[in-house]
Amino acid sequence: MTCIFCSIARGETHSYIIYEDELNMVFLDIYPVSKGHLLVIPREHYESIHDTPYKLLARTWFLSSILGRIYRVEFDAPGVNIVTNSGGAAGQVIFHFHVHVIPRWGRYGGFWSGRHRLTEDEAREVIDMWRDKTGIIIDALNNI
Ligand code: AMP
Ligand code: ZN
């Protein structure tokens, strides 16, 4: 079975990486609903939130929360959604556990409204935004 997110975690499929460590990776969703829509994954393959061992789940969820807080506090986003889909009936399409971190920059027009194909320019802009935030992420992770 081939899993696209395992392939991204191994560095075999290209992604726009925002942050990575030995346990997790954060990269840009290729069909973002807003500028800066992130996906947070454990490097190891687990089908959904409900298959992921507790410690890794806690770490992945905490990392997602840190990223959301950085959007709210550092980037002044007026809102952020932090969500995971479990099961096809809930809209899960990629069966490798991942958390969506979706900053909201303006009026809320519905959960998936504004979805578009990620462009190279947009990806570069978001990567630049996050370039100097790695230290904040690591400091927060060390405070678990
Ligand atoms: P879900 O519906 O929760 O399974 O979401 C899967 C997400 O993965 C969708 O938002 C897709 O746009 C995104 N996605 C699929 N393939 C890739 C990829 N190769 N790189 C980045 N994001 C992807
Ligand atoms: Zn996988």
Image (spheres, grey):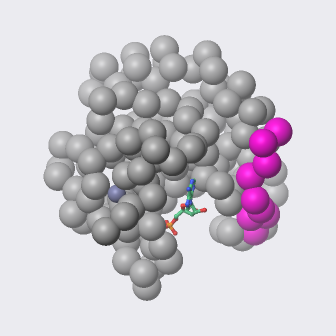
In the image, residue 15 above or below residue 113: above
| Residue segment shown in magenta | 113-121
Residue 93 in sight: yes
Pick the quarter of the image with the N terminus. bottom left
Can you say whether 84 is above or below 15 in the image?
A: below
| Residue found at x 75% / y 33% | 124
Position of residue 27 measured from the top left corner of the image (x, y, whole percent): 54, 42
Query: As drawn, which residue projects farthest toward the bottom?
Result: 89
The quarter of the displayed image where residue 59 is located: top left
Q: Pick whichever, 1 or 62, lies toward us.
A: 1
142 or 98, which lies in front? 98
Tell me: residue 14, above or below residue 98. Answer: above
Q: Residue 22: image x %, image y %?
A: 30, 30
Q: Is residue 52 magenta?
A: no
Residue 139 placement (x, y as % from top left): 40, 16
Residue at horizontal 73 percent and vertical 40 percent from the top: 123
Percent across and percent down for residue 20 are: 43, 30
Magenta-span inclusion, residue 120: yes
Q: Residue at x 31, y 19 (%)?
A: 142
Q: Is residue 1 left or right of residue 131?
A: left
Instruction: Locate residue 2 relative to residue 28 in the image: left or right.
Output: left
